[in-house]
Structures are given as structure tokens and as C-alpha cells.
Image: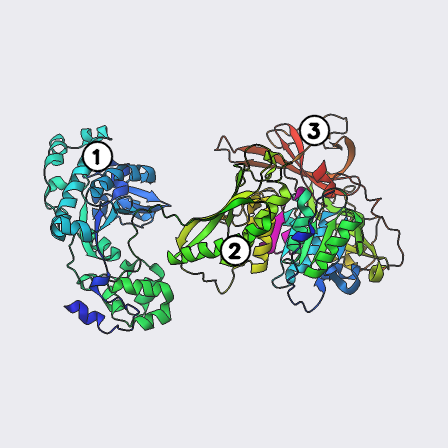
Amino acid sequence: MPTFDSALIRPATLAPTGEDLLPVLPALAPLLPGGGLRRGTAVSVLGDTGLLLALAAGAAAVEGTWSAAVGLPDLGLTAAAGYGFDLRRLLLVDDPGQHWPEVVAALAGAVGLILLRPEGPVSAQLAARLTAVLRRGGCALLVAGPWPGAGLRLAVKSARWFGLGEGYGQLVGRQAEITAEGRGAGARARSAHLWLPDEHGTARVIESAESVETVPVGSSGAAVRSGTAVPPGATVFPGSAVLSGPAVLSGPDEAEPALGGLGLAVV
Amino acid sequence: MAVTAERGPNPDGGAGAGPGPGVPRVLVVWCPDWPVVATAPEAAGTDRAVAVLEAGRVLACSDAARAAGVRRGQRLRLAQRLCPALELRDRDPETETRLFEPVVAAVEAFTPRVEVLRPGMCAIPVKGPGRYFGGEAALATRVHAAVAAALARGMSRPAPDAQADAPPEAGVRLPTGQRVPGDGPEAANPEARVLPHCQVGVADGLFAAVLAARAGILVPDGRTAEFLAPYPVAALGDEPLAELLVRLGVHTVGDFAALSGRAVADRFGPTGTAAHRRARGLQSRPLVPRPEGLDLAVEHRFDPPELLAEPLIFIARTLAEQLHTRLAAAGLACRRFAVEVTCADGRSATRLWRHEGKLGPFALAERVRWQLQAWQTAGTFTPASAADSTDATDPADAAGSGEPAASAGFTTLRLVPDGLVPDQGRQLALWGQAVAEDRVERAVARVQAVLGHAGLRRAEPAGGRGPAEQLARVPWGEAYEAPAPAPWPGRVQDPAPSVVPRSPVPATVLDPDGLPVTVSGRAEVSAPPARLVLDGRLLEVTGWTGPWPAVEYWWDPDRRRRRARFQITVAGERALMLTAEGGHWSVEAAYD
């Protein structure tokens, strides 16, 4: 249980913010209630760093908004830049250890967005106290992993990489089905099919033309180099980001802690 | 005097101190071509053309090279075209400084207030020694003789091979011979060219004195502006300004000095004003002798020892105020300051604080408060804690020592300024400069109080092919010089991996027969990879590409690496970047 001294929490000197939503990349907006990250709330991202970075990248578009990455020493900064992150306005706290609640509390009043991987399990009490600090500071929190009382949980339900054959080609992108579930305004389950990342390293909606063409990868030996026409023969994704009805969701407990994703760091 | 006539039109120039008397007389000793003298002593005075290079340009050259047209600042290629026999040397600042030390010592015999401007040039104020030695001319003569003697001694001792090259009779006679000194020493007599010679100049202010030394002239008191007038504006040492002035039709220092000080300040700002003051023979900066131990630290002793932190924080604010006043009185600003706390049992802890700009007293006090709170949280001074619990993340900045006994209160709080610089204020650029806002700065400082200086980093561009090499993580507040942008052929293409572990994770790659896959020196795989063993799990390889060989720094035995990179996808739709190096496989990055 990390020590957390409430006396260290400074009274918020909140910059006057006209709106309480941080924008996200257009491709991801349909996944979020209101189309953005609500300031002062926590969003839990399960098992996929690419999704975490894509969600955070939109905040860089807001003039003067800083971001911080706490406890994420293995974040691919080049990939972050690819999604549109402004690395000049990013603070990196790689090893907060047991002090991560203090660090989050200190940063909450200054930055608009915090990416966090807490060390160890987070108690509901601590989460509630930190959420209060975040609300005062007008700061949104993206947690890599489960977070008690998260307003929204996002996960990659299925994904497929394109571009690699048997000894040739090069990764050009990933088509992923992303699901979101939450409470309140986010209670309705949503999902979207996206390029995450696409051949330029950013996130975008899959064009319907791309999902119609079928190029067998790996079997017939057609080298797939262009990033625009790749989808598999088997899966035909529906068109642009679709808000589906109730979907089968992978809850926080089902997210397998495996290699890749954030699990690689603890290998 | 003509000088007063020139200064007359500028009563508004902010030079309220007036002419002549306000500017101290300065004597400059200049040893020409010092880099050449230091790196190629055997070539000095001979017909050999030698040039010393720095960053691909000529820094200094010998007389023979100069006669061939080689000039300071020329590109190497042009210099070689002008003088095909040119011998090249790399700059060696250590040797320059070491060989110049006897010269400084010789000048120090006249006055202890010697300011070394750079190896090969030093300055002294004339006022005291000039009166003692019977006038400026006499002083200049004596200094010149002493320096010439020191040069002769210094050159004949540390470089024995130099004597073999130089004519022996010259090498012996000159040390004892009293050189003809003074205003025009550069040498009608051929012997003077055999050994490195020196020139002495005296003028009002350092800037003019340097030019006077180059010319070997003693400029009479108050006639400095007249002396400077014929020089081109480039001599003012401000290249962009000089370029602009020439385009505006102001070609000489005299023309520039004739402009009104107010107009110059309006158009060219502080740097222009400084140049204008130099042009008028005034001082743009005072002569600073070798730094004396200026003790600006402030401290407060607690008697009896204080058990609570809150009073310390109160006192810290007062101390910060004091420190700020002292610094302001000295015209200084500090880039860093140290907070030192001592306990009754003798234990102490120190932490250095940095800041991008100027620390106001309030900001300074706030940092002391955060620091004390951080120490309390870390249990640095609590009786139960072990002594080594100060701060594991950054032992260089924190020093907790002594017995793990009860500390019994704080006895001393001390603030020590460090990294003192002249307070010139801070001017922010108008565009294109990412400046941390104040609230971000404060948050950063608080995090650094908890985690140590290296606990908070920023991303800076670096060069490299691999995903981990393209950006560097630099501690916040530390200077970082980005390498020049380079194309890095063969760098891994977009999309970039989203997970880059700090150290690659070992793995094993097997072929369909279950044998380890190897990569030959010709970048061929022994068999297609079929399975990946990572952390005890067996994963089916569904697609792969590579190897992409990367042979880096092969010229440097410490840094050279020979790697082959692969991209693979494994069952479960994950994409990884593998690296084969020295027969071992590892996961360098992951894409999800």
C-alpha cells in the first residue's frame, strides 16, 4: 500500500478551461461519450499500448496542454510522435515506484493529461482520492491497466497485422476492433474498427474500399507493401467506425497479461 | 581632442558615466598564433606552413601559411588550395593552456589581477601597476620583456626537439637578451621570429585593448574612440550586427559610433547598445579578475534544535529573501542552489536545485518547502529510518550519512547559491520556443523533490536506427545538445513500435524442425523461423521478414555492434521486432 500524504496535495490553481473535454483523434471519438476525454475522470486502457498512445495523442492538439507519462518507462516515444504527440510538451516520470500517487497529485494541477501505469494494485479509496485531485486540476487520466471506478474501459477485442509474408514485406499497419464500456454516459457499449496504427503510424478509420479488397497474406505469396490495400480474405470488417449494440466485451479480468502490450515490460 | 567631439553628439546614449575617466585602462598581452605555437612549436618561425583546425575551419596559421593567403576562419579546402604544402594540426586546448601558464605567471608578477581571456591572450588593469612601475609605457615595456623571457624559457624546455629544428644560437641568445619592447614589437629583427613573440597593447577598456595589442600600440588615455574609428565594423565582434551595419552603409567603427545611442538602442537592443558602447571606447563589460571566493550562502542556526519542519519552512522564506537580496546586490543570478539541512546528531542532507531561468525568492522558498517535505516523506530524518533511505533513485544528489540514531531536531538550514552568472534578465523568443509554463515548472520541481533530479525526464531527438535510439530521455533541467539531423539509412520504417523495453528481452527462435535459427555473416537465415520461445511460452510464428542487417560503429571497438533485425507476427496477432546479435535472439520492441 503506497503511502500517500494528503497534506502534499496543493490547492488547485486551475486554469480557466472553457470546456471539460480533451479532444481525441477523430477516429477514436465515436468510442468516447461526448467524443473526448472528460477532464477529471479516469479511463482504463487494457493491454494495448498503441491504443493508449492513440487516445492520448489528441490532447496534443490543444494549445498549451502538457502531458505526462508516469510509470511507463517502455513507452515507444517514436510511436507516440507518430500518433501526433507533441514530445516537447511531454514529461516522463519513468520510475515513480511507490511514490506514484504523490507524483500524479503533483502533476494533476499542471498538465492536462496523465498516462499512468500504477505500481501494484490500486485500492478504491486511493483511486477516489486521486480522482478528486484530478477533478480539481482539470486533468484527465489514462490508466494502463484496471482502475477502480474508471468511467470508461477500453480494450482491443481483436486485431490483425498486415504486411508480413514468409520472409518478405514489412509491417504496414494493424486493423483492430476496439470496444468501450463504462458507466453513466458511457454505459452503452461501443466498438469501432480502426487502423491502429496505419502505415503512417497514426490511427484512422478503415475505409470501406479497403475492407472489400482481399489480398491473402502469406499463403499466395503476394507481397503486401502498400498500406492501403491489405485486408484479409477471411475477415471483412464493416465500414467506418460503427456503434454496435451490446457486444461481448472482454472485461478487465479477462485481459491476458501476456507478452507484447504492456506485459512485455514485466517479462 | 577629436574624441570628445565624437562623444559630444551622444549625451543621450545612456553613458552617463562620461568618457575617459569611467573606463579603466587595460593592458593586454597577446601571443600571436598561440594554437600553432602550442601544437607545432618546432614549426614556429620557420618557413613551414602550419595551420591548426577546429571544426573544419582554420583557427590559426603560421606566418608562412599566412603569406600564402591562409586566413583564420577559412574552410580547409580553400586553405589547402591556397597553400598546398600546408601542414595540418588538430587543436589541443590542454597544451595551449599548459604552455600559456608560464606567461600568465610572468604577468602575475606585476599584478595578481590577471584575467586570462583565452590561451594566448591575457589582460591586466593598468591603474595600480602603471603607477608603481612609472607610467604605462614603462609598464608595457617591462611586461613585454618579462613575457618574452617566459616564452623563451617555456619553449626551450618542454620541447627538446624544437631546439634541434631551430638555429641553436638563436635559441640560446634570446632568453637572456632584453628584447626591444613596447609599442611596436612585432619585429623588424629576424631573430624575433624564431621564437614565439608577444605583443602588448594598452587602451581604454578591454575591447580596445585587445585591438591595441593586435596592433602593438599604446593608445593614449581618452583617445580610444579615435583609435577604433578606422576599424571595420566586423571588429566589434558581433557578426550578424556587422553584416547588417555594412548593408546599411555603416562600414567603420567610427561611423557606427557617430550614430545616436538612443537610435541604436531602439533598433538593435541590448547587444547593439553594447557594441555601440565598445565602438565609442566605453566598456561593454567590466574587467573581471580571476574569481575570488564570493560567499553568498545564507544560513540560520536553530538553538535549541527545532523538532518540527514548519518553522524551518518559515525560516526558509526569510533566508530565500536574504539570498535573493545578496545576489541582486552582487548583480548575479544563480542557476542552481543547494539546500543543506543539518541535524543535532550531525547528520546532514543536501540537494541541488536547478531552474531554467531566474529563481525568485518565493519560488526559492517553495522549493525548500517541497524538499523538506520530500525528506520527511522519505524518512530521511526520522529516528526509525535507516541512514541509507535518503533517496535510492539519485544518490549523487542526496547525501544521507551518519548513525541511524534519533536525529533530535534540526540545527542548521543553509542555502548555497551555485552556478552564478551575471544577471542579464531573461528574454523569451517570440516564436518556436517551447517554454515550460510556470505551473509546469513548479510541478516538475515537486516531482523532482520526491524522486530526485533524474526522476523526471523529457524526450529529446537523438540519432539512430533502432526504435530505442531515435529519442533520448534527458533529465529535466539538464542541458542537451541534439546531434545534427542525419538521414540514418536503414532505420526502421513507420509504423514505430509502441513498446520499447529498456533492455531487450531474451528469446529463442526455432525453425520447423525445432532447431535454433541462425543468421549468417551474409545476412541469410539458416531456416525460416517457425516458433518463438519467450518467457517460457511457445508461440507460433505466422509471418516474418528480415533479416535487416545493421552494422554500426565498426570503427569503434567499444561501441561497435553487428545486428540483424526481424519483424515477426505471432499467433494471437501480436507483432514483434526481434534482434539477432552474436547468436542470441531478443525482443527489441513490440508493436501493440
Circle count: 3
Which residues fall within the magenta stretch?
Answer: A80-97
User: In this picture, is B584 found above or below B342?
Assistant: above
**Left or right side of B211 for A106:** right
Q: Element at badge 2?
A: helix
Q: Nearer the viewer, mark 1 or mark 3?
A: 1
State which chain disc 2 sits on. Answer: B
Q: Nearer the viewer, mark 2 or mark 3?
A: 2
Mark number for residue B317?
A: 2
- Image x and y of residue B378, in percent: 63, 42
State which chain disc 1 sits on. Answer: B
- Image x and y of residue A119, in percent: 72, 43
**Left or right side of A207 for B177:** left
User: In this picture, is B257 found above or below A40?
Assistant: below
- Of callouts 1 and 3, the N-terminal one: 1
Could you tell me which residue is drawn at 67 percent across and 54 percent down?
A: A9
